[in-house]
Image: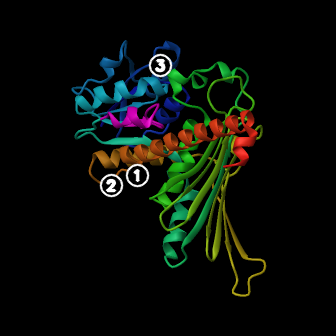
């Protein structure tokens, strides 16, 4: 099967290095010719002069899209109109309303929620399914990085290009993971701030979500974490599942399963460690291929992205209201006390 690629940066390179057997990357495009040349060197594909050369249904059946957020939807729309299948990096769009305008038609849209394909998450899901009577009480997540010099001058810091800050970048990953376990989540409270970086988008966001049964999900995402961290914890009535690390700068990937004893006290603990090599990209690319071939359902698709962006929209709206209330409180302290 022939695929094309638009966007040849870091994420595009990871995709290109993890193509499943039976897939050939035949063309790529990036405004930065040096980046496109690197992908061509890895895969042997031709370098296109424009996006339309890649989106040619006579040459490819699918396209990988890994561009800045503002460029994604026009490309995906064009691909769907031409009957091409698309694997597009999260968050797919700058906003829920922008994504809502997309009509996939008969095209398969796979969204780059690669965290779903980490082995610790597979094991976590498997263990929870083994214990259907042990219901989830709450989920807690912490995800952050220390960014880099000049971060506040990159495209991610510009609202018109990114659509938002840390919530839209890393936040959608933990929202998506929690939504797999608690599908009917809605926003209870959200708070975004720009603590450190000199930019108009958030560098820290906190959120509290819940489902109709009362199970809750709380998280904090940050680009002023300084020591990169990933922590995803699921608490059931009898167990605590603790997923730590993603490999590389986030530390070794591990899953701890703490099982409560009948007499309570210190739990029984099982520790599972995973290889340092990150195979989530290959696993996700393979799911996309199998979905095209009719061998599997899409694991993380268009509807999942819509749900995540609806949560992002509601968290930002909630945060704006909270900021307005706090400002009103500062300006009118006596009025506030009477409320």
- Rounded to the nearest whole Å, what is the CA distance between mark 2 and mark 1? 8 Å
- Rounded to the nearest whole Å, what is the CA distance between mark 1 and mark 3? 28 Å
* Element class at badge 1: loop
- Residue at numbered disc 3: 36
Assess disc 2: are there few (<14), some (14-19) or many (≥20) residues with their C-alpha within 10 Å of its C-alpha.
Answer: few
- Rounded to the nearest whole Å, what is the CA distance between mark 2 and mark 3? 31 Å
Which circle marks residue 273 in the picture?
Answer: none
Residue sitting at x 51%, y 42%: 312
Q: Nearer the viewer, mark 2 or mark 3?
A: 2
| Looking at the image, residue 272 lies above or below residue 23 | below
Q: Which residues are magenta?
A: 87-102
**Membership of 261 in magenta stretch:** no
- Residue at numbered disc 1: 299
Which circle marks residue 296 in the picture?
Answer: 2
Is there any visible trace of residue 336 in the rendered image? yes
The image position of residue 119, as x and y in percent, is 55, 56
The image position of residue 112, as x and y in percent, is 46, 41
């Amino acid at each position: 099967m022939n695929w094309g690629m638009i966007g040849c940066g870091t994420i595009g390179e990871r995709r290109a290095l993890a193509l499943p057997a039976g897939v050939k990357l035949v063309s790529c495009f990036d405004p930065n010719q040096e980046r496109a040349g690197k992908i061509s060197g890895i895969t042997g594909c031709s370098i296109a002069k424009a996006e339309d050369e890649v989106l040619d249904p006579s040459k490819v059946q699918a396209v990988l899209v890994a561009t800045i957020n503002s460029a994604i939807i026009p490309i995906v729309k064009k691909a769907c109109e031409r009957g091409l299948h698309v694997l597009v990096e999260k968050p797919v769009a700058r906003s829920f309303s922008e994504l809502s305008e997309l009509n996939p038609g008969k095209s398969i849209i796979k969204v780059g929620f690669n965290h779903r394909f980490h082995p610790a998450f597979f094991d976590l899901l498997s263990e929870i399914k083994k214990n259907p009577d042990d219901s989830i009480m709450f989920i807690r997540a912490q995800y952050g990085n220390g960014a880099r010099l000049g971060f506040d001058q990159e495209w991610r810091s510009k609202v018109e290009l990114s659509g938002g800050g840390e919530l839209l970048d890393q936040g959608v990953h933990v929202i998506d993971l929690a939504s797999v376990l608690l599908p009917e989540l809605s926003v209870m409270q959200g708070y975004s701030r720009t603590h450190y970086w000199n930019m108009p988008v958030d560098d820290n966001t906190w959120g509290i979500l819940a489902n109709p049964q009362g199970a809750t999900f709380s998280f904090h995402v940050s680009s002023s974490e300084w020591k990169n961290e990933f922590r995803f914890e699921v608490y059931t009535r009898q167990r605590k599942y603790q997923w730590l690390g993603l490999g590389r700068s986030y530390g070794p990937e591990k899953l701890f399963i703490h099982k409560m004893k009948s007499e309570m006290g210190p739990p029984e603990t099982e520790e599972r460690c995973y290889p340092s090599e990150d195979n989530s990209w290959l696993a996700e690319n393979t799911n996309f291929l199998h979905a095209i071939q009719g061998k599997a359902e899409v694991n993380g698709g268009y509807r999942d992205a819509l749900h995540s962006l609806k949560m992002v929209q509601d968290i930002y709206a909630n945060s704006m209201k909270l900021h307005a209330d706090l400002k009103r409180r500062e300006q009118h302290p006596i009025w506030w006390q009477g409320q």
